[in-house]
Amino acid sequence: MKFIYYSSILALTVFKYSNAACAGPYAQCGGVGFSGENCCQEGYKCSETNEWYSQCIPDVTIPESSATSSDGNFYNSNDNKNYYNDENSNYFNNENNNNYYNEDNNLPRSPDAGQWFHDYFVQLLENDKFGSGSSSSSGSNNSFYDDSNNKNYFDDSNNNNYYTNENETPKSNASNSNATKQNENFFDNEIYANPRFIEEVESSIPKLSEDLQSKAKLVKDVPTAVWLAWEGAPGEVAQHLEAAGSKTVVFILYMIPTRDCNSLASAGGASSLETYKGYVDDISNTISQYPNTKVVMVVEPDTLGNLVTGSSEACKTVHTLHKNALSYAVDVFGRMENVSVYLDAAHGKWLSGVADKAAKVIKEVLDNAPNGKIRGLSTNISNYQPVYSEYKYHEKLNGELEKLGITGMRFIVDTGRNGVDITEAFNINQTWCNFIGTGFGERPRGNPDPINMPLLDAYMWLKTPGEADGSDTGSRADPVCAREDSLPGSPDAGQWFHDYFVQLLENAEPSF
């Protein structure tokens, strides 16, 4: 996969092109050696990603009236509910004065955090109901450990106890700090459908035949991941979580500095490690305000692959930076109870032959994330490998990880574009850009084949199918996208590619 994703951007629906000479939405507007326009059309600003690349992104400082739709747009609907400032969901501004950090409510003479506090233990003991004989809905046997109201926090068969599970072996690294946090597969829950994908599919429906229109109407409701791939993406997280409610939201973090160091189409990312850390912190702080929403966080597609095989100077010089960034993301998201983390592990055609090296890099990343715990690994993002070959890679990589003491890993596989087995053609050319002949694959769901593929947590459409991998023209042209096995006429990476969507729809297996 060599692409850049802006599918998570909640696109502005009203544009005023008052300055036609300036660069358009998401176009390049600066960078070393760039000779094009350095200004952006109204409603956008030129943002520097690094010294080599600047891009026109939405200017969030423009007046709300010029940046929103008046037709009940999901992101600023006529119910006047502002998802960026939801007073009803602000857990840090509690109007009921339930301030858990209020000094007046604290029991005095507490030792440091984590140390035994005898007086507080006495208070808890006195105020509980151990053998008190007081009446309750559970009868006279008020045992904390055997509550008929199913509030047994040590053995909760109904609520997927995150602390112990006799049926699953905890995963660990050398220091055993990466023990399994949770045993729940968040993909067993209903999965959130990204409204961006729905809008994109709807834009293609009028151009289709009657038969394809009926199929496209089914496709648009298939859940797809939300990509966090530009500097304003943290500001979009809340509205997805708000809309999802109790559903599982799948986010893909794709903002690592010097992102995809072997590619032109998807170059970019945060300007520095410190900027990246702030980016991760902003996202995690928002997620923490929605503790009842399950979140899957897929961390940095392609980065592990480039760490293992990237031999260009552009990749070799950022190995340490990328390892540190991955560890930070795992450490932050992996400590959150409602977040299930999957570190991306490229795909089998890329790393199966060097699975032992990939496992060592994964171990190094996890060892440097002492507080974070991952559920497992994601594969095949934006690629086309069939499920059966990817699962062989899962088994091989899992075996190598177990040799290093990392056990209990689970996997998710991107099935958005692998409905057609293109293995033979891929072996010849190994292109990643808008491959000709592909089709939609298996629909997203959890535990798709627990008997034959017990390591597999889910099928999921991780790359937004129908969005371009890259283009062979323009300022971001990538020569791979000009190969004969790449569908011609593609827009820039991350933009909707109608012709490719039609191909995926026609070749879908299973069909719609």
Image (cartoon, helix red, strand yellow):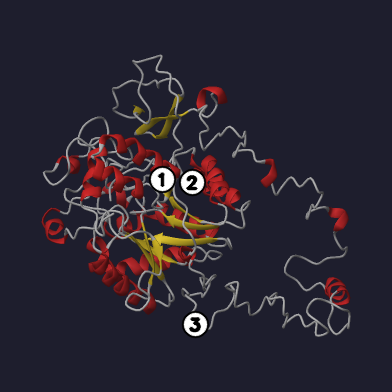
Q: Are marks 1 and 2 in contact (CB under 8 Å)?
A: yes
Q: Residues within 10 Å of mark 3 (few under 14, many from 20)?
A: few
Q: Position of residue 497 (x, y in %)?
A: 27, 38
> Residue at (35%, 69%) from the top-left corner?
359
Residue at mark 1 to residue at mark 2: CA–CA distance: 7 Å
Above or below: residue 498 compared with residue 404: above
What's the mark number on residue 167? 3
Circle 2 residue:
276
- The disc, 2 or 3, on the residue closer to the chain's N-terminal end is 3
Residue at mark 2 to residue at mark 3: CA–CA distance: 37 Å
Query: Which is more foreground, mark 2 or mark 3?
Result: 3
Label 3: which secondary element: loop
What's the mark number on residue 257? 1
What's the mark number on residue 155? none
Residue 112 in view, yes or no: yes
Residue 303 as seen in the image, left or right of residue 270: left
Above or below: residue 218 compared with residue 119: above
Label 1: which secondary element: loop
